[in-house]
Image: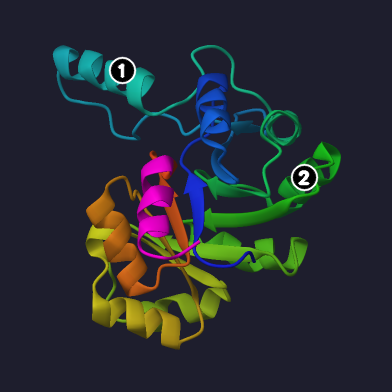
Amino acid sequence: MEEKPIIVGHRANSGRIVYWYKRMGVQYVEVDVSTAPDGRLLVQHGPPGTARATPIGRIAQWVDYKLFYRDPLLRPQPLRVWLRLIREKLNVKGVLVDLKSDVDPASLRREIEESGFDGELLFSTNDHRTIPGLSRELPGRTIIASYSVVPYDIVSCTRPSHASGIGLRIDLLDEDLAAKIRSAGYVLSSWTINTRSQALKALRLGVDIMISDRPDIVARTLEGAGRP
């Protein structure tokens, strides 16, 4: 991996976000990948899985998804196509592929090979059952086990999957938890770091991968703190 910490532009799923990150000079971006009903791997986060209970709530949910989840307004692109576009348009050093649904590891490997992407690739998923297969199909890659809640013993929960990293929201991290993760030898990833105070917290806790909607703010904060 690159010299730490890595700043990753969050949800580069659409052309407008790719253009935004290009203007910032972002070197690493995240893309969300979901499996379509026909088995294709598409670059999209997708709406929240649980529909609201009322018609007004469902309308608000649809608006929230379209405005803030950063998926394309029209047809989502296959992963292989999007990786080529990102390499051509951004000339990034690396891409963090966040798996949002059950993904066949062999299909993912083939999609990456067909893309011709030659930068660094990292992977994250909250479906830890797929991590052993990802490790077999993508040897030597950083694979992050993501958590939306903190288990009683996060290291013991992660170890059976053979993940190489652990990912947590920045609000879930504290000094003891971060120290435990890092002392166990895991790469530490955190999201979504959008403010100066969050960036300073992540820096203090030794976060290796900082995922951000505002990588420009994070970069300026780290520069001011004397870090690359």
Q: Residue at x 53, y 33 (%)?
A: 21
Residue 218 drawn at (x, y percent) = 38, 50
* Range of residues picked out in magenta: 216-228
- Three-letter code, disc 1: Trp
What count of labels does the image hold? 2
Residue sitting nearer the eye, 92 or 180: 92
Q: Could you say which disc has been placed on residue 62 in the image?
A: 1
Q: Is residue 155 visible?
A: yes
Q: Is residue 135 above or below residue 213?
A: below
Residue sitting nearer the eye, 139 or 170: 170
Q: Could you say which disc has been placed on residue 216 in the image?
A: none
Q: Residue at x 49, y 53 (%)?
A: 7
Q: Is residue 111 above or below residue 85?
A: below
Question: Mark 2 or mark 1, which has the lower sequence index?
Answer: 1
Left of 118 or right of it: where is 154? Answer: left
Q: Tell me the colour scheme of the image.
A: rainbow
Residue 101 drawn at (x, y percent) = 52, 44
- Secondary structure predominantly adopted by residues drawn in magenta: helix
Q: Residue at x 50, y 61 (%)?
A: 228
Q: Could you say which disc has been placed on residue 112 in the image?
A: 2
Crowding at mark 1 (Cα within 10 Å: few <14, some 14-19, many 20+): some
